[in-house]
Amino acid sequence: MGYAGSYPGSRTETVPIAIKILVAGGFGAGKTTLVGALTEIRPLRTEEDLSGPGMQVDITEGVERKTTTTVAMDFGRITIREDLVVYLFGTPGQQRFWFMWDELALGALGAVVLADTRRLADCFPSVDYFERRGTPFIVAVNCFDGARRFDPEIVRSALSLNLDVPVVLCDARQRSSCRDVLVTLVEHAIRLLAFGPDPVSSAR
């Protein structure tokens, strides 16, 4: 925690601690929805309509109703208390925008990889990316209406995740559910910072 004006007779002002969290995952997994459910400000969105050429690049099988795509990032803010603020950055899911991930990932405490069981393979690029960077992450399975529900351990096995990576179920439309996801991530990141990865749990 930083302070300004600490000399005698001055006004002491608290400089907020900023926590940066990424929300990643495949195209159509619900990243924009999750950021919108959590943010206390009007979310910054960079969504564009899916054009004819874009439809040829973005595979919409399983998410045929999706008509827009994030072309840069989603941004939101949550004030936990006066001296603690969380900034959310939703990453673009399509491969042609992956070049932005390095910039967005700088300084992040951790990441939520949002999974859609209808297109689970779309999670692999995000999982691989954060594993290579050593960024703490969790997998949150977005429970879409009509989608088949799977036990988190089945999802873990399908994604070949280390045993110490939390896998949780969520509803990206519900603020309380999304809040629980962030709490799980922060607890996981703090545990890794304090103790490091469990060598037994990290074995696949």
Image: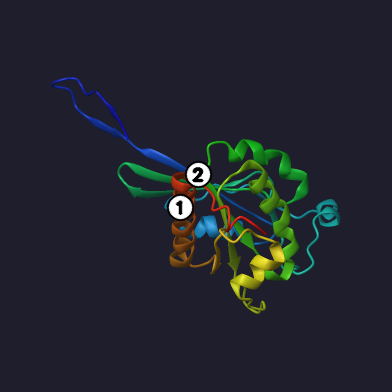
Percent x, y of residue 3: 28, 29
Mark 2 neighbour class, 10 Å CA radius: few under 14, some 14 to 19, many 20 or more: some
Q: Identify which residue is drawn at 65% across, 60% down.
A: 161
For the C terminus, the quadrant is bottom right
Inspect this view and state whether residue 107 appears. yes
Q: Identify which residue is drawn at 67% across, 44% down.
A: 132
The residue identified by callout 1 is: 186
Above or below, 28 relative to 23 = below
Q: In this rendered view, identify the residue nearer to me: 164 or 104.
A: 164
**What secondary structure is found at the residue carrying circle 2?**
loop
Corner quadrant of residue 83: top left
Amino acid tagged 2: Leu
Q: In this rendered view, identify the residue nearer to me: 152 or 24.
A: 152
Mark toward the start of the polypeptide (1 vs 2)? 2
Residue contact at pointers 1 and 2, CB within 8 angstroms: yes
Percent x, y of residue 203: 64, 57
- Residue furthest to the front: 200
**What secondary structure is found at the residue carrying circle 1?**
helix
For the N terminus, the quadrant is top left
Inspect this view and state whether residue 93 appears. no
The circle on residue 109 is 2
Amino acid tagged 1: Val
Q: Identify which residue is drawn at 62% across, 77% down.
A: 145
Mark 1 neighbour class, 10 Å CA radius: few under 14, some 14 to 19, many 20 or more: many
Percent x, y of residue 116: 67, 66
